[in-house]
Structures are given as C-alpha cells and as structure tokens.
Image (tube, rainbow, N blue to C red):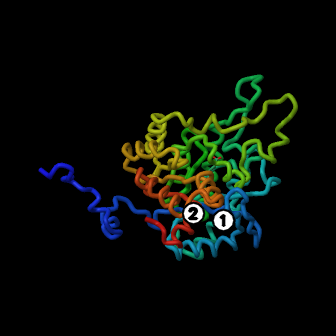
C-alpha cells in the first residue's frame, strides 16, 4: 500500500513527455486516411470559390489536376469526385448524370492518365446535382391528388446504375452511392458486373442522415431540393416536389435503423460503408464499427468544416487544434477513412496526429 494521499497508480506518468504520449497513442490520423472531395465542372480555366465553404472551389478538369497533384505530394491519395453542371443542363431525370462527356467521367480519365494507380478515385453517385428539382432521385406521382410528388425508388435505381457504369467505364476505382434509395447497392453491383466492371468497388453511404450540416455542400453542388432550377416544377395546382430529403435520408433520432441499413448494404455487396455526418453521429459510427468487419468511412461534412472555419475566423477557436481533435475523434470512434475538405491543409500543415 502507498502512504495515505499517495496514489499507487499514476496514469500521468505516460503523459509526461510528447515522446511518451506519442508512444502510447491509441489512434493516429495519417494523410492516407483522408479522402479529399473535389467539385468538378465542365469547360476550361474555371475556378469558382464557394462562399459558404472557405478554401474550396469548383474546378474545371485542367484546374483539378494541379490540386490533385498537390494532395498526392502531401500524401493524400484518395479523392471523391462530385460533378456540378449548369442549371440549364439539368432536367427531371438527371439525364447528364450518366453522360460519358460529363464533368466526372472527363475528370476520371484525366486523373487516371496523369497519376495512374497512385490515386484512389471514388465518385459520388447521386442524381441531386443533375436534376432540376434537386432531389436525389426521379419524381413520380404517388397517391392520387397528393399535394407532393414522391421520389420513385425503383426508377431511380436504373438511373443510379447507369451513372455508376459510366463512372466505372471512365476509370473509377470505387463508386459511392449517396442517394439513400432502397436496394441501390444490389442494383449497382448487378449493373457493374453486367458491364464487366467486377473490380470496381462500392462504398455505400449506408448511414446517411437528413442533416442541416449539408447546407454549404448544396451551395457548392447547386443541389438544394427546390433550388433555382426547380421553379418550373411549381405548376399551379399540381403536385410539388418534396421540400426536403426526409423521405429518403435517415432520421437523426434513429440508431438501430443505422445498423439495419449497414447490414442491408453489406448483404447487397457493399465493399465499404459510409457514416455521415461524422461528429454529431460518432455514437452511430462506433456502433456500426462493432457490427461489421467492412472498412468504414466517415464524412466530415461541409457544415462541420464550415463551422470550424467560421469559429476560427471569429477568433473563437484555435482551428488547427479543433480540427485535429475532430479528426482524431472520428478515427477513435471507428473510421478507417475520413472524407474531409481539410485534407490538404491537414496533411501539408503536418498537424495530423
Ligand atoms: C449528394 C450528397 C450530399 C453530400 C454528399 N453527397 C448532399 C445531400 O445529401 O444533400 C453532403 C456532403 C457535405 O455536406 O459535405 N446526395
């Protein structure tokens, strides 16, 4: 026994020096754990900053290449591509989503040519950036005389499968459906296999909550439901597009449902699963981690990133410290990989853990 007032066990011993703390650290965040989102537009020489997402731009393919090269040099080897098309190229079916000359297939071919297999190329598969109503699927009349249209799950599957096949043909390593339709992993797997794309993987956004934290992304991708391009859907007296994504993205109150979604997507053939957003849903991430052996990806979404930037700009938080802590928390909760807009800053700044 120790003398009274003298602790026998002293956890502080292992916190005494930085070298000791590093030696016993339980998780690390390395550049190869990070996935950089890229917003791709058509044309040449385009670089448009996104006001609500500081430091992030929409780039044409020629401008994308130097940024990807910079990321690779810093050790960030994975990218997820989001296509952005002009409003006048959008329609009710999201026809441009599977256009082989669209921004994402063009970017895939250019990135692959430039970097070969050094880069891991993922693509977001979802219709919301290509539909004029801004929804992630095709709309249809549900019940007669209903005031709102509904998202037609099964017709949407055909569009998503076509989009995934177009991305695979252009060189994607992994397609990442983020639409939250039921059965889309199986539909996409079937279509990829029919096209001979057996080696192309699926990262399913299995657990994606309807979240207010996606706001800045929707500015970046021009994909708000009911956004500018949606106006002509407001036919007087006719059914309106749904005002939000609550009928397909998950309800933030549900945890068991997350396990169900994850199990379904695994059974349908997903190679990796996404949990999204990250920080407000770390409990969900930890529970899914315990329930599957698949690699897990967490998405530090636009609102999470923008919030830290705004707090730092207001002088309220130390950005580097807060961002490092957030990324560590996401890894500690069970993520193998993290999608983050801060990937390059974090890797170049050498402030990862
Ligand atoms: C497309 C999609 C969204 C995000 C990723 N893919 C937006 C949405 O569902 O509205 C959000 C990413 C972010 O906020 O950074 N469906």
Q: CA distance from mark 2 to mark 1?
A: 9 Å
The location of residue 237, given as percent across then percent down, is 85, 28
The local secondary structure at tag 2 comes to loop
Q: Residue 94: x, y in percent? A: 72, 49
Q: Position of residue 30 (x, y in %)?
A: 44, 66
| Count of numbered labels shown in the rendering | 2
Above or below, 81 against 128 in this view is: below
Q: Nearer the viewer, residue 240 or 308?
A: 308
Identity of the residue drawn at 64% across and 53% down: 163
Quarter placement of the C terminus: bottom left
Q: Which sits in the foreground, 106 or 39?
A: 39
* Horizontal relation, residue 100 to residue 271: left or right: right
Q: Please say if 148 is above or below 34.
A: above
Give percent across and percent down for residue 43.
77, 68
Secondary structure at badge 1 equals: loop
x 72%, y 68%: residue: 60
Quarter of the view holding residue 312: bottom right
Instruction: State which tag comes first along the sequence, 2 or 1.
Output: 1
Residue 40 shows up from this direction: yes
Residue 75 placement, left or right of 106: left
User: Residue at horizontal 44%, vertical 45%?
Assistant: 266
Q: Residue at x 48, y 35 (%)?
A: 257
Q: On residue 346, which mark appears?
A: none
Please tell me which residue lies in front, 69 or 154. Answer: 69
Is residue 258 or residue 316 the one in the foreground? Answer: 316
For residue 82, which quarter of the picture? Answer: bottom right
Give the residue at mark 1.
55
Whether 69 is drawn above or below 81: the answer is: below
Q: Which residue is mark 2?
A: 342
């Amino acid at each position: 026994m120790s003398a009274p007032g003298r602790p026998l066990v002293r956890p502080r011993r292992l916190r005494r020096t930085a070298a000791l703390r590093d030696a016993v650290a339980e998780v690390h965040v390395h550049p190869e754990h990070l996935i950089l989102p890229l917003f791709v537009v058509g044309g040449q020489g385009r670089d448009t900053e996104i006001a609500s997402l500081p430091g992030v731009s929409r780039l044409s393919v020629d401008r994308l290449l130097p940024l990807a090269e910079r990321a690779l040099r810093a050790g960030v080897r994975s990218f997820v591509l989001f296509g952005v098309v002009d409003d006048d190229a959008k329609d009710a079916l999201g026809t441009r989503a599977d256009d082989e000359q669209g921004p994402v297939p063009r970017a895939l071919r250019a990135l692959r040519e430039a970097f070969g297999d050094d880069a891991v190329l993922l693509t977001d598969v979802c219709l919301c950036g290509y539909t004029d109503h801004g929804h992630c699927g095709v709309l249809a009349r549900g019940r007669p005389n209903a005031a709102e249209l509904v998202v037609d799950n099964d017709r949407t599957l055909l569009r998503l499968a076509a989009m995934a096949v177009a991305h695979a043909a252009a060189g994607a390593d992994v397609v990442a459906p983020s639409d939250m339709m039921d059965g889309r992993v199986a539909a996409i797997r079937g279509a990829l296999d029919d096209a001979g794309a057996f080696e192309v993987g699926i990262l399913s956004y299995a657990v994606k909550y309807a979240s207010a934290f996606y706001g800045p992304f929707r500015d970046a991708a021009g994909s708000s439901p009911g956004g500018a391009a949606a106006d002509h859907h407001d036919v007087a007296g006719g059914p309106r597009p749904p005002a939000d994504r609550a009928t397909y993205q998950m309800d933030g109150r549900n945890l068991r449902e997350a396990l169900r979604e994850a199990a379904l997507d695994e059974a349908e053939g997903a190679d990796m699963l996404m949990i999204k957003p990250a920080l407000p849903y770390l409990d969900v991430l930890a529970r899914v981690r315990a329930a599957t052996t698949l690699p897990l990806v967490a998405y530090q979404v636009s609102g999470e990133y923008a919030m830290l930037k705004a707090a730092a700009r207001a002088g309220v938080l130390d950005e580097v410290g807060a961002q490092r802590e957030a990324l560590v928390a996401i890894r500690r909760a069970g993520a193998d990989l993290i999608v983050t807009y801060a990937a390059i800053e974090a890797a170049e700044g050498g402030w990862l853990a």
